[in-house]
Image (cartoon, rainbow, N blue to C red):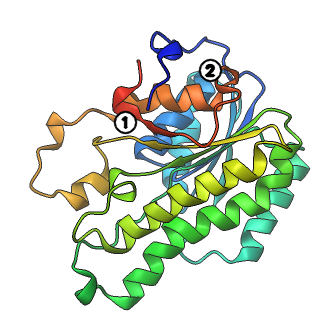
Amino acid sequence: MVNTDIKDWIAAPDLLTDRIILITGAGSGIGRATATAFARHGATVILLGRTVRKLESVYDEIEDAGGPQAAIYPLDLCGATPQDYENLAVTIRKEFGRLDGLLHNAALLGALAPLTHFDTELWFQSIQVNLTAPFLLTRACLELLVQSGDASIVFTSDETGRQGRAYWGAYGIAKAGVECMMQILADETETNTRIRVNSIDPGPVRSALRTLAYPGENPGKLPLPDAVVPVYLYLMGPDSRGVTGQQFDARAFPG
């Protein structure tokens, strides 16, 4: 989905100046690409992920580029409890006082298998990371987002969440749930808050998750995660005010 009014949109250098943005799965792939891009455009980013080494690498890259000092928050979404998310929100409130953006990017593929043979434990893990975690994190951070006065929640989705396909199991079902959650949340926040909520299907990009899903594919023929950053910048910045409840396709977005 692309609004014709933004067909020539280009991110201004100061697009995200003074904004506080939390990114899940920030250690690699699209999470890393968006984190460094947000920082280049002036945002202070909170890097959330399970591997400290990867988060530190992103932190160093932002620092070396002269961006605002980032923050690191290690958390394994697979084992996180509701209280863990509440603790995160308390920390953000203490350190920053508000939250201007929340990017749900972390994902767990699990396995590609028929539902009749899908491993039960893997089902629970995939639903936990891909659907339950975004719900719990969003709920914990809503009051912080209200404090912003101009906040954006973005869910990284997948084409299998918009059209079911055989063998995509818990991952595809969770992404379908994410799309529905996005629309419900957008409807609930549209009239009484300044929060906008949208989803993005990034399409095929060179990432670890893509390699797991398509092991025989030549990754060299895929675009790098940086190629899909423009739509994330647009939705996180002020130019997308009033845009909510929409499903975006990064491949159709200018940039």
Work out whether 7 lies above or below 44: above
What residue did someone put label 1 on?
225
Q: Are marks 1 and 2 in contact (CB under 8 Å)?
A: no
In this view, the residue in front, 90 or 137, is 137
Q: Residue at x 23, y 60 (%)?
A: 213
Dot 1, how many residues are within 10 Å of its Cα: few (below 14), some (14-19), or many (20+)? many
Residue type, numbered disc 2 = His
What residue did someone put label 2 on?
41
Q: Position of residue 57 (x, y in %)?
A: 50, 43
Q: In the rendered view of the protein, which quadrant contains the N terminus? A: top left
Q: CA distance from mark 1 to mark 2?
A: 17 Å
Specify the quadrant of the image occupied by residue 246: top right
Q: Position of residue 92 (x, y in %)?
A: 82, 51
Looking at the image, is mark 1 or mark 2 earlier in the sequence? Answer: 2
Q: Is residue 82 left or right of residue 110?
A: right
**Element carrying mark 1:** helix
Q: Residue at x 73, y 67 (%)?
A: 85
